[in-house]
Amino acid sequence: MFEVRNDEPDYAFLWDKETKTQNRYGQDIELAKAGDDLHGKSLNINGDSGIGDNPNRYKQHGFFFTADNCIGCHACESACSEKNDNPAHIAFRSVGFVEGGTYPNYQRINISMACNHCDDPVCLKGCPTRAYTKFTEYGAVLQDPEICFGCGYCTWVCPYNAPQLDPVKGQVSKCNMCVDRLEVGLKPACVSACLGNALDFGVVENIPEGRVQAKTEIPGFPSAEITHPNIRFQQTRSTHREMTRTDSMPVKYHRDDQVGLFKPVVDRKHGEAMHWNLRKLLTSHESAHVIFTLCTQGTLGAFLLMLLGPSLGLPELALVKQSPVFAPLLASVVLLCSLGLYKLNMHLGKPHRFYRGFNNLRLSPVSREIAGVSAFYTGLLGYSAFALFDNGFTDFIAGMFGMLALIGGPVGLFYMYKLYRIPARPFWNHYQTGTAFFGSMLSLGGLIVAVAALTKLPLSTAGLPALSAGLAAVIATGLSLEAFGHLMHARDMQALGNEGAASHYQQTTFYGKSYWLRNGLLAYAVVQAWMLSLTGVSGGFGLACALALAMAMLISAVFGRSLFFVLVIPTTMPGAFFWKNQGFVEHARETGLADAPQHGVVYERHHAFDVGELMATIKAHSLDDMIKHIKWIFGK
């Protein structure tokens, strides 16, 4: 148990005596009634089997923050980091702020935020490894970093930026509500350290002494309807109608007088000039997801066309299965799918723990996506191994593997779509994600089959024009579906006015030239594909048109999917000018400021390997020195 000091001040102790029975959302505050099986169990903190004597041990607790009192001293951050022995680049609790007005009527509202231990924790539902648990003890949502394999999905779905993905260790950790202190009647370390009495803690809905409000929202705080967070606010001082962020996010908050709440709107503070920014677009942290999604969708489409095409109104596809195209096509599909899975797995913080991704099939769309794609890949490998033999037994085995792939592939694609429908990321939370994914399956799948056919069969082959026309029709359908989704997405994002509109603003400015190149190539590809669906590919001119179509499709697909990942702006908490500011993080990594730990920025582990340094070490040092140097590089 946590050791209570003899001189512990009175304000450090929990104060709740009487509590309410339900919170404002109609849920019971008492999470386990007397006599329940969950009663009387130890949390085994530091191996101690004791049970705390807190009379409210099984009631939902939460934080209470009074913005009027916060002076932005960051004492809560320091106390939290010291208590949890966090490195400089990880902070379970952080203080950001929003500003409004001009001199002399200038105002800043500080916001101290950690995990809110929500009634409906989306991190718990989303985590594929089941690293999260919501305990009946205090209602704490606890996370085990040792179970985590570093996919970072919890950091996507959380609206409050509570889970922290460590780019060095490759695992997530977060606020644990200081349950060891609660067990002995003490408030969390951050609350006890607060100088201005801005932070308090207790059973949720209990307003602390001297406070008059218990709001669920404050300027800069995302909607409480997403997760029902267990934090309450007080802000009695009048605020300006518009509050802005000092970090790089192009978002500000405008008061809606009809409901009295602040809503996020676009802050066009970066201007209207259009840029390429190709390096940031094509080499982002999420490039592995770009490769994985495109490869998986394309190979699934190609496999479906090979197996089901003749029975779905494309009899000319029988030519592919009975010709020299079949073996190279299967090999290409297997290699592309393997590449996508390899890039995704190596993107994990702990790639060797990939098998933990199946742990949460009951709740997590990520686990279901992994299961579906794994079934598809297994079926694809098995089918490829047996389909090339020509006898009844191998045909039967190949058919079984093919059925597995035909079931697993669509399931994996569906949950690949579902996992991006995240309320905390409005730019993704749109049916355009589905049109893009299913459109890519058709267009890239048709392209893979068409490339294999046109490179392996002479143009004079009987039936080739009909085959190419049919594949062009499939490609055109997929591209048209994708183009329709993009048009509707742009219209709807602008109408939203929230972080989704801010993402669209960045799309048309910061990446504006890349965005319009993608649009132009997509429009050209749609027209060209429909034309080829009428004429087929015949002669040198037709082959040149097909090549131009393929190039336009590939560039458009890579640019479009890269934009999808780099543009998303989450409903996250505001940072400060330096701290928790994504713009400063990028600046620090580009200029070398990340080498100084006091800035709270580190390089991502995936980018820390310096080949030049390693080669110099190989030439100049012994094997032992080289091993030490490699360990230092990865530790860096």
Image: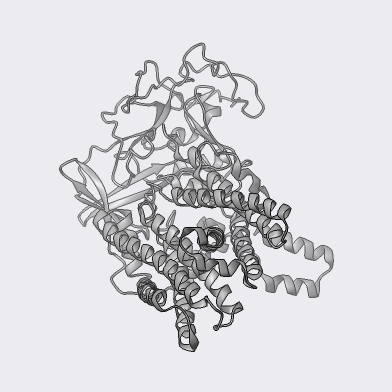
Q: Residue at x 41, y 30 (%)?
A: 62
Q: Residue at x 57, y 70 (%)?
A: 319
Q: Quadrant of the C terminus?
A: bottom right
**For residue 417, side relative to residue 50 (left or right):** left
**For residue 627, side relative to residue 252 (left or right):** right
- Front residue of 212/449: it is 449
Q: Residue at x 27, y 31 (%)?
A: 213
Q: Quick check: can you spot residue 383? A: yes
In x, y percent, where is residue 300?
A: 54, 59
In x, y percent, where is residue 425?
A: 39, 51
Q: Is residue 113 above or below residue 49?
A: below
Q: Is residue 346 above or below residue 257?
A: below
Q: Quadrant of residue 146?
A: top right
- Front residue of 367/572: it is 367
Q: Quick check: can you spot residue 297? A: no
- Front residue of 556/29: it is 556
Q: Residue at x 36, y 40 (%)?
A: 226
**For residue 460, side relative to residue 68 (left or right):** right
Residue at the extreme top: 35
Residue at the extreme left: 258
In x, y percent, where is residue 143?
A: 55, 37
Q: Quadrant of the N terminus?
A: top right
Q: Quadrant of residue 234?
A: top left
In x, y percent, where is residue 154?
A: 49, 45
